[in-house]
Amino acid sequence: MEINKKYKIYNNKFNIPELCVPAGNLNILKYAVAYGADAVYIGGSRYNLRSFGENFSITEFKKAVTYAHERNVKIYLTLNAIINESELAELKKYIIAISKIEFDAVIISDPSVFEIVKDLIPAMRLHISTQASISNSIAVNFWARLGAQRVNLARELSYEEISQIVKKSKIDIEVFVHGALCISYSGRCMLSKYLTGRDANKGQCSHTCRWKYYLMEEKRPNMFLPVDMDKRGTYIYNSRDLCLLEKLELICKSGVSSIKIEGRMKTENYVAQVTWVYRQALDMVKSGSFTAENKKYLLEELDKTTHRSFTEGFMFLPNKKHSELTGNDNVGYIKKYRFAGSVEFFSDKYGINIIKARNQFKKGQTLDLIQPGKKPSSITLKSIINFNTLKEVDVVNTNDLVIINELGNFDEFSLLRVKL
């Protein structure tokens, strides 16, 4: 194949990798499972890099594991924060509290967490986070000797480097294929703490790299000079979103065991749509139907999610000074569609799923119906009935409960979107 002539493959270990996706709460986890995840990674309120998210309580951990395992999906617990000396005692208490929960693995970056989990939960599988910045096979096998079963490589590696590492490694290799990137090496950043006091390495990132910045000369206070502004402002630290969909077949040829999607702060709408696309893509690779036409269709579906400009990142760009990595103009959020609604509950009385509006939509608009395992379909709204009043309405506002008979029978995990 032409693609193989451009990128050297160092082994013949073709593999359909596990699809590992994020969930910030129990509801989103259910959507991730419904839309095709093989594994879901989650976190609690402490000791992970999304501590300001909704996250899971210990009771919800148990529910999540039971729900996923009943559907043959794995659950990974994220404990990848950097730990200070003063936190060790509380960390041990936390790990003891979750020690009986049957997670399929714990994701770690700090060696102290690795040692404590090994000691307190000796049977637990241990995965090493991308935060550990592992960039070569010797480092992978170092962690393997300590007892790790998987390593998520640094995102700054090229495809050829990853392929070589897979060939030489004694344990599973995982790579990120989609989602937000960080300007700092493997996400190790101090900018947030410096400007806001919120430590990104403890899950408190304030996303200061996404802010607007101006230049000010020290002897001319309050005289702000623009720095290559676009119409939305200046984003000198911003980065694009990773999207490796078009290279998925080649990633399978590298032999990696798992591909990962970023986004534990994202909504069920985002997680469901991105999971659906990558599930379809992996199934197409497996069946030999991952054609240029199908790639184009799936990329168009990804473009309907809210995202920044896409990039193939370090893995496939020819050099680390490529404009996609260094150019920060016009990389604010792209939003072509709006999350319109989700299923709130099933009404036995009316024999139909009741829709909860997530944003405003109107009679006469065309909505896309997204369902697990099916291609999205479109419908023009001719009739909307308010569930509480049973009266027909022309406009639906956020949190309204409505009946849309034209949708027919649809899945409980269905989502609605509307074009902006």
Image (cartoon, rainbow, N blue to C red):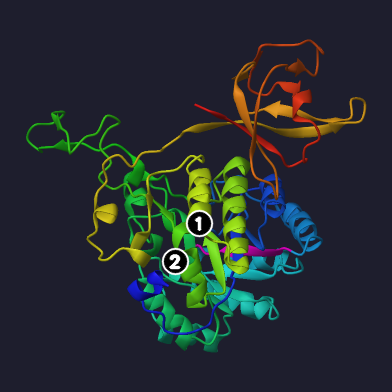
Q: Indicate yes or no whether the magenta region holds residue 76.
A: yes
The answer to whether residue 325 is seen in the rendering is yes
Quadrant position of residue 182: bottom left
- Residue 127 percent coordinates (x, y): 57, 73
The answer to whether residue 83 is seen in the rendering is no
Spatial CA span between label 2 and label 1? 9 Å
- Residue 70 percent coordinates (x, y): 82, 61
Instruction: Please report the residue visible at 40 percent of the width from the left and 65 percent of the height from the top.
Output: 155
* Residue receiving disc 2: 131
- Residue 373 percent coordinates (x, y): 70, 50
Check residue 77 in the rendering and tell me which mark sits there, or answer none.
none
Residue type, numbered disc 2: Gln
Quadrant position of residue 41: bottom right
* Residue receiving disc 1: 49
Q: Indicate yes or no whether the magenta region holds residue 366.
A: no
Q: Using the image, determine if residue 174 lies above or below residue 204.
A: below
User: In this image, 174 relative to 311: left or right?
Assistant: right
Looking at the rendering, the stretch of residues picked out in magenta corresponds to: 73-81
Image mark count = 2
User: In this image, 312 relative to 412: left or right?
Assistant: left
Packing grade of label 2 (10 A; few <14, some 14-19, many >=20) is many
Q: Using the image, determine if residue 322 lies above or below residue 209.
A: below
Give the SS element for disc 2. Answer: helix
For the stretch drawn in magenta, what is the main secondary structure?
Answer: strand
Q: Quadrant of the N terminus?
A: bottom left
Q: Are marks 2 and 1 in contact (CB under 8 Å)?
A: yes
- Residue 45 percent coordinates (x, y): 60, 52
